[in-house]
Image (cartoon, rainbow, N blue to C red):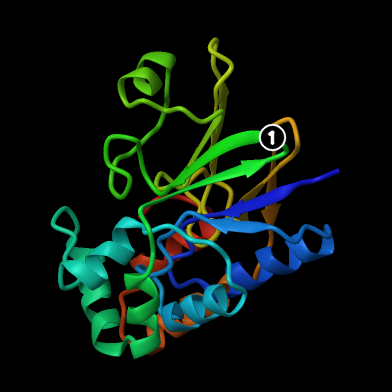
Amino acid sequence: MSKIAVISDIHGNLPALEAVLNDIKSKQISTIYCLGDLVGYYCFFNEVVQKINELKIPTVLGNHDDALINNKGVIARSKTCTQILKWQLENASASTISFLKSLPTHLEITHSNHSIKLIHAGLKDNVDEYLFDVNDTYFENHQLNEDLLVSGHTHLPSYKKLYSGKTWINPGSAGQPRDGNNKASYVIIDEGLNPEFIRVSYNYALVIEAMALNGFENYISEGLKTGKKL
């Protein structure tokens, strides 16, 4: 039975990414997609980008990725995010910048004869729109032609099947869960477009320690213990 895995919002959290990739491999799933935000928040961002690039995982542009390469690291609504991204910009490798600049804002794929649209955020703004819920009117207004929309950005695992038959899935965040569960989150999608949300334990203490060593305040990484938003 053919299945695909979708990961999102890794945010420089290499231990979480590695745990998720190992879990996907253990389930013998070879096709993986990523919904962006490889950078931001945590300090292993070059390593995360390198890993995604090495494995040739198709990836879309996230808002933190976009801010890093197109807005000098500035996310206007968050001083904390801007502080971190400016540090990352100073420490970004040439290959990291090059890879992020190559990312599209959306991907359209086919899985088991179903059409799927992959974006980081929303249909109105692929890079920086928060979708906490969807309905058929929203899909119609923004001309979703595909059977399934998969989006990230909120860090909250979500699933909804609409009256039209269209489906929406959010895999949650691998690198910074915000639903009160501190385990890394991703989703497996089967041939019928049914989601299986997976949670994976990882050593978040490595991230907290690395952030402290790089001079960042504890509050930025403490949320990894609780799985709650900063």
Asked which secondary structure carries label 1, the reply is loop
Say which of 67 and 154 sits in front. 67
Q: Residue 8's x, y, as percent? A: 51, 55
* x 32%, y 86%: residue: 92
Residue 93 visible to an observer of this rendering: no
Image position of 203 (left or right of 24): left
| Image quarter hosting the C terminus | bottom left
* x 60%, y 51%: residue: 6
Q: Say above or below: 97 vs 10.
A: below
Image position of 46 (left or right of 2): left
| Image quarter hosting the N terminus | top right
Residue 112 visible to an observer of this rendering: yes
Say which of 46 and 143 sits in front. 143
* x 36%, y 72%: residue: 100
Mark 1 neighbour density, 10 Å: few (under 14) some (14–19) many (20 or more) = few
| Total labels drawn | 1
Image position of 69 (left or right of 161): left
Residue furthest to the top in view is: 163
* x 54%, y 16%: residue: 162
Q: Amino acid at mark 1?
A: Asn
Say which of 190 and 133 sits in front. 190
Say which of 120 and 224 sits in front. 120
Q: Residue 144's x, y, as percent? A: 42, 28
Q: Say above or below: 208 vs 106.
A: below
Residue under numbered circle 1: 113
Q: Say above or below: 211 vs 220.
A: below
For residue 81, which quarter of the picture? bottom left
Image position of 202 (left or right of 38): right
Q: Residue 223's x, y, as percent? A: 44, 59
For residue 220, which quarter of the picture? bottom left
